[in-house]
Amino acid sequence: MIGLTGCTDLKPLQAQVDDLKAQLAKVQGDASAAKSSADQANSAASSAGQSASGAQSTANQALAAAHASQSCCDATNEKIDRMFKRSVSK
C-alpha cells in the first residue's frame, strides 16, 4: 500500500513539471521574439542615423554653396556700384 500511495503522489508533480516545461517553452519563444524585435529596431535606428548623417552632409554642402553664391552676388553688386559711381562722376 505504501508503494502505491507513493506512485500516486508523483502524478500531480509530473503534471506540474509538464506545465512548467510548457510555460518555459512559451517564455523562451517570447524572449526570442523580443530579441528579434529589438534587433530590428536597432537596425532601423542605425539606418536612420546613417540617413541623418547623409542629410547633414547635404545640408552642409548646400550652405557652402549658398555662401559662395552670396559672395559672388556681393562682388557683382560692388562692381555695379563702382560702375555707377564712375559714370556719375564723369
Image (cartoon, rainbow, N blue to C red):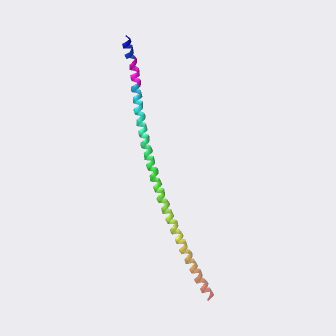
Q: Is residue 2 above or below residue 61?
A: above
Q: Residue at x 62, y 86 (%)?
A: 88
Q: Quadrant of the N terminus?
A: top left
Q: Is residue 38 above or below residue 84?
A: above
Q: Is residue 20 above or below residue 47?
A: above
Q: Is residue 72 left or right of residue 22?
A: right
Q: Residue furthest bottom?
A: 90
Residue 7 image offset from top left, x and y in percent = 37, 16
Q: Residue furthest top?
A: 1
> Front-most of 2 and 80?
2
Residue 5 image offset from top left, x and y in percent = 39, 13
Residue 2 image offset from top left, x and y in percent = 38, 12
Q: Residue at x 41, y 27 (%)?
A: 19
Q: Residue at x 44, y 50 (%)?
A: 44
| Residue 70 lies within the magenta run | no
Residue 76, located in which quarter of the rendered image?
bottom right
Q: Residue at x 47, y 54 (%)?
A: 49
Q: Is residue 90 above or below residue 76?
A: below
Q: Residue furthest right?
A: 89
| Residue 12 lies within the magenta run | yes
- For the stretch drawn in magenta, what is the main secondary structure? helix
Q: Quadrant of the C terminus?
A: bottom right
Residue 83, located in which quarter of the rendered image?
bottom right
Q: Is residue 19 left or right of residue 90?
A: left
Q: How many marks?
A: 0
Give the magenta part as a residue range: 9-16
Q: Is residue 64 left or right of residue 4?
A: right
> Front-most of 86 and 51?
51
